[in-house]
Image (cartoon, rainbow, N blue to C red):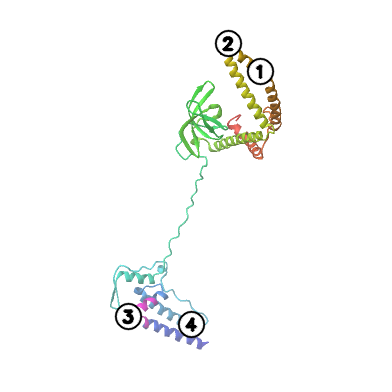
Amino acid sequence: MLRFFAQVVIAAAFWAAVVWFGLPWLKANEPGAYRRIVSQTTKATPENASGYIVQAVEAVGHNVRAIKDNPHELPELPPLMPDSQKDQPIVTNTTEQVVVAGEDRSSATNQQEAALVAPPVAPPVAVPIAVQEEVEDPLSAMNKDPGYTWGIVVTNSFFYDEAMNKTGILAGGTVVESKSLRLLPDGRVAECFFLTDRRWNYDTVHLYESDLVLFDVPYEKAPKAKRDLLVEYCKLLGRLEELRVKLHKDLIQRNPHLQEYRTVEVERKEFENKARQAQAEFEESSGNRRMELLDMLRKYKAEQIGIMKRYNDVKFKYDSWKTENLGDGRTGRSPKTPEMQSIENKLNAMRPAVHEIVPGL
């Protein structure tokens, strides 16, 4: 055991001598190697390395004395840097020229050496800032609101120009803003802007007020929840009407008496036109021509009996099939597709809430 401690003491003294005498010689003759050794073994710079060397030598002597006094414990090394300097960054002069071993080096070279000596500084970590994304309103307008009272087209409805000529159809659920109202013999008419593809169309159209539900504020100020409910409800009404018309046309084409009915209908109309013209000419004619037209009208009267009988027979068969398959419009019985039934179910579920906003809609 004493031999082991003697070896430790000799080794410590040897390396202390190397540090004490070798490093100053290395600094004077091989400054590059000296800087690399300093940067790899301590937190010092070449300029303050001598202080660290003194501390290292004292630390070695301290260990030797501790081992001698208490051979059963291995003493801790005292810190090589004062506590007040442990957390301070190492500052390297990168602007002044430095003369090392007779060599003049520029600030650029000094900066490169400082990069080798100074520990890398971690880049600041960006702290994410919680940003609440604004939810887009899919029913909002993307251009300026006209600023008039808003309303909804209840179901698919004709719109007109200023002279009340039919121009087209607006689908149910179309949002409008009423610029003005005027009274016509068959009802009040609203001059309206309308919203399509989330953009206001500033070319006004005219709709009967009975085809609209109007409110007291501009569209952009309408309560969103109620607005969305009403728009969706009226869109479903329009879609249901569209499907009902389409189904009606499809079923009409399936009527087995359709072609026969069309043929006899054309025959009846042609005969009525011919008889009407003969009657008008008879009233304006005289002499022999008048007598000829009178005989012709008598023949038409006899032909009319047969034509109307054929027409009525075919029409009865046509109408009977139509009533059986499409309903008569009075009983409420009508055919439905699965999509139509689904829409009706949605409307029934929405109706109580809708009636709280617009009773009877």
Bin the neighbour count of mark 3 within 10 Å (Cα to Cα): few under 14, some 14-19, many 20 and up: few
Q: Spatial distance from mark 2 to mark 1, Cα to Cα?
A: 19 Å
**Residue underneath mark 2:** 287
The residue singled out by tag 4 in the image is 67
Of residues 276 and 176, the one drawn nearer to the viewer in this rendering: 276
Residues shaded magenta: 22-36
Asked whether the beta carbons under mark 3 and mark 1 sit within 8 Å of each other, the answer is: no
* Mark 3 or 1: the one toward you: 1
Determine crowd level at label 1: few under 14, some 14-19, many 20+ residues with C-alpha closer than 10 A.
few
Q: Earlier in the sequence, mark 4 or mark 2?
A: 4
Please state which of the two labelled residues, at mark 4 or mark 2, is closer to the viewer.
Answer: 2
> What kind of element bears circle 1?
helix
Image position of 47 (left or right of 180): left
**Residue 88, x across and y down, in percent:** 40, 66
| Amino acid type of the residue tagged 2 in the rendering | Gly
Q: Nearer the viewer, residue 187 or 43?
A: 187
At label 2, counting other C-alpha atoms closer than 10 Å, the crowd grade (few under 14, some 14-19, many 20 or more) is few
User: Looking at the picture, which amino acid does disc 4 mark?
Assistant: Ile
